[in-house]
Image (cartoon, rainbow, N blue to C red):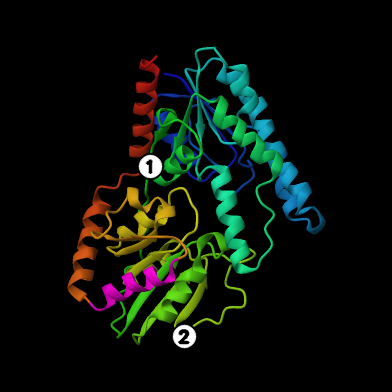
Amino acid sequence: MKIVYTAPNRSHHYPYAAALAARGALAAFVSGFPRFGKQAALDLPAGALKRRDSVQLLYLAALRTPFLRQRPAEWLAYLSKCHLDRASLRWAREADVFLSYNGCALSSFAALQGSGTRRVLEVVNSHVSCQDELLADEHDRCGLPYKGVFPAEKRRRLEEYQICDHILCPSSFVARSLIARGIPEAKILKNGYGFRRIPTDGRPKDERNGTRLLYVGSVSVRKGLRYLVEALRLIKRPGVTLDIVGPMTGATGLENMSLPAGVKFHGVLKAGDLGAMFAQSDIFVLPSIEEGQALVVGEALGFGLPIIATENTGADDIITDGREGFVVPIRDARALAEKIDLLLCDDERRRTMAAAATQTARFLGGWDVAGNRLVDSLQTLLKTP
């Protein structure tokens, strides 16, 4: 089987490409990730990596130029995907499967119509209309302006949903959002991501009173942190703290909110310090409004942390509600507070969930496992009419 894979950035795409290559299935990886980036190196068979990053480099330059950060940068991001699309066709014509990131495939998919090449669209977040609606509503609740998904990009993604043969997604949440907007269930493939093990520096856990809640991720409207902060305010128990790890990314959703005592922002932490933060914590909480599958849930499980996460994070594919933690609705500070409080007042339940989290983490595969699952799924596709 020959797979051509196209993606605009590094993210999980590099590990996927490496895993496909390890199975001997990768004919070409067409990458828009800048060749000059610190993490640009990728060990693939000779000739398999096809860098097409010229427009992406212009886009990144625009982001660093104040008067170009708005529409010009958005146009360049859009054009970069179109550039990857056009560049991919020469290799995709010879492939059994052309797997491409959403936004990078429309003209190639059209050209491959009826060719025998299976056209698989990779979608990493919920249906573009779903995420646009969720985020527009959330910004409105926060009293913040919202630009929405770039219109040309949104139209392109919607067309790709229709023209592709199959859609690859990472979680049941993403699958549900697609089905709810008319995508046939039979068209959807689900393949969860691989999970990494976060190293720790081995420092002993603090012996102190109280309970440490941990959030890891960007500090942005999308992540729903305002509801976690409000939940902390609703909890009436002393000694509960919240550590927030991650970069500030523009509007946070915390504007004009007074933060209760015990909230601490740590910014971005590197591997050992991040591992130590996990190891020092008692409960991991992820209140996101929308994301395809949160890798940080698996990382937290590896440290034996009970998880409290919203249903829009893909967490329900990783944990069982009531076993390793709880899955709650989005935008529900009271539900978050109730589950946190339940664990605070029941040490036995918290220890049981921590043990279950550790056990589940042992069965979470890395990117080699995720890549093998993907190859197996695509091989099965080729056997069906």
Q: Position of residue 88 (x, y in %)?
A: 61, 25
Of the two numbered discs 1 and 2 on the same chain, state the one appearing first in sequence: 1
Q: Position of residue 79 (x, y in %)?
A: 72, 37
Q: Position of residue 135 (x, y in %)?
A: 58, 56
Residue furthest toward the top?
115
Residue 210 or residue 125, whichever sits in front:
125
Residue identified by numbered label 1: 192
Q: Residue at x 35, y 22 (%)?
A: 380
Residue 186 sits in quarter: top left
State the mark number for residue 261.
Answer: 2
Q: Is residue 255 above or below residue 221?
A: below
Residue furthest toward the right?
67
Density class for disc 2 (Cα within 10 Å; few <14, some 14-19, many ≥20) is few
Identity of the amino acid at label 2?
Ala
260 horizontally vs 111: left or right: left
Q: Residue at x 20, y 69 (%)?
A: 349
State the mark number for residue 315.
Answer: none
Q: CA distance from mark 1 to mark 2?
A: 37 Å
Residue 356 or residue 14, whichever sits in front:
356
Q: Position of residue 235 (x, y in %)?
A: 37, 81
Identity of the amino acid at label 1?
Gly
State which region is magenta.
332-345
Q: Is residue 343 magenta?
A: yes
182 horizontally vs 207: left or right: right
